[in-house]
Amino acid sequence: MFNVYVVNFSSLSHGTAEEFYRLRKNIFKDRLQWSVNSSDGKEHDEFDNANANYILGIENGMIICSTRIIDMKHHNMLNDTFSAFFNDVEIPEGHYIESTRFFVDKERANLLPGTRYPVALILFHTLINYAQRHHYDGILAVASHAMMHIIRRSGWNVTVLKKGISEKNEPVYLLLGHTDEASQQALKTRIFSQSDTLDDSLLNDWPLPVNTRSDAE
């Protein structure tokens, strides 16, 4: 059964971490050709530390999707790596999280029930759930042009704070994702239109907590 969990870096089991970082290397370095570091077939960086939590979509022990979330009060990519993409970025006053390393493995997602299981939409909705539970004012992220198109179609209410240029000389967008009820409902409507195996209570429960290393296996 597909479920979505949240787990802290310190609680990742060895097996889950190995699979997770190898999957990230396949997606971000090999397929997308981002300028990321990798070693031993794995991609991870200085932001993978005890301040990082991960939302993981898992089906029968197999990671389908994920995003990394870091409280903006900690060292983060927007104030470091991504700062070179933008000029004079002003973050609105408030309590925010940063979402990075967002991915859906399409080959694995195709194994889920139905022809168009809405994994990306579920991940968006779960991010909003997480932010609401922890009393954040919004979610900050840097999106490519392709991801921007997906977000626009999802119904999620986002504000473009700044447009920049990535290291690949491609347009990127600094987004503030809002955590309002209208966004949640719009995402649910889209999710239910693409899947009849999900219900409201399940979407509201995600992400489920992972309290021990064995839970994340």
Image (tube, grey):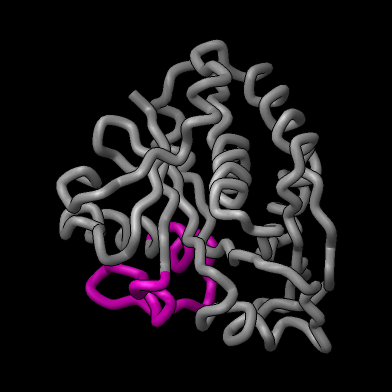
Q: Quadrant of residue 191?
A: top right
* Residue 161 x, y percent position in the rendering: 84, 69
Q: Which residues are magenta?
A: 26-51
Q: Label the magenta part by its dominant secondary structure.
A: loop
Residue 211: where, in percent of width, then height?
Answer: 26, 49
Residue 166 magenta-drawn?
Answer: no
Determine the image quadrant of residue 96: bottom right
Q: Residue at x 54, y 62 (%)?
A: 32
Residue 212: x, y in percent? 20, 50
Report which quarter residue 21 is drawn in.
bottom left
Q: In this image, 38 relative to 179: left or right?
A: left
In the rendered image, the vertical position of residue 101 relative to residue 51, given as above or below? above
Picture coordinates of residue 207, whole percent (x, y): 45, 40
- Is 45 part of what is drawn in magenta? yes
The structure residue drawn at horizontal position 41% and vertical position 72%, both measured from the top left corner, is 51
Name above or below for residue 107 compared with residue 159.
above
Residue at point 58%, 30% (across, down): 118
